[in-house]
Image (cartoon, grey):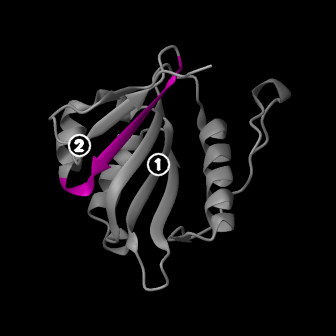
Amino acid sequence: MATLIHLIIPDDNPLGIRTANIPGKSLRAFVVPRALWKVAANEMDELQNSGVYFLIGEQNDEGLFNAYIGEAQNVLDRVTRHVSDAEKDFWNYAVCFVTIDGSLHKSHVKLLESCLCRLAKSSGRTQLHNGNAPQTQKLPTSDNITC
């Protein structure tokens, strides 16, 4: 069975801002170059929702991609703070996954952040710039996410 993914390139620049979603699903993905973050902040209201995000930079001398993985109740506000954070000046792109219907709450996104950090570390392809290891969250059995 095939899955349809809608990819939107608002300014017709494949290296610019891009969004993607699977029709009928509650998540939307955004890829935003750091240089265009202010444009996205002014035009992409959905980034104000809760979700997880990756700040991705070039490969370092060991061939590992520099990355930071985070979570936020308001992804727009959180990534906007990272734009001017001197300790996180390594990144060129933000990749954000946000809920479009409010279905992810704080425990969900904290669990996703923890799983994604663990997966990134075990891949052997990234150097994470996270200051601490996110703790695994407990969710009700009905909400449990396997990672």
| Picture residue at 49% right of the left edge, 84% below the top | 62
Instruction: Locate residue 100, reporting x and y percent.
Output: 45, 23
In the image, is 106 to the left or to the right of 59?
A: right
Q: Is residue 48 above or below residue 85?
A: above
Q: Where does label 2 land, which residue?
A: 14
Q: Main secondary structure of the magenta part?
A: strand
Tell me the crowding category of disc 2: few under 14, some 14 to 19, or many 20 or more residues within 10 angstroms, Cα based: few
Q: In the rendered image, which quarter is residue 139 located in?
A: top right
What is the quadrant of the N terminus in the image?
Answer: top right
| Picture residue at 25% right of the left edge, 56% below the top | 34
* Residue 8 at least partly seen: yes
Q: Is residue 26 above or below residue 35?
A: above
In the rendered structure, which segment of residues is drawn in magenta? 25-35
Q: Estimate the spatial distance between the alpha carbons at disc 2 and disc 1, rounded to whole Å.
A: 20 Å
In this rendering, the label closer to the viewer, 2 or 1: 2
Of mark 2 and mark 1, the one earlier in the sequence is 2
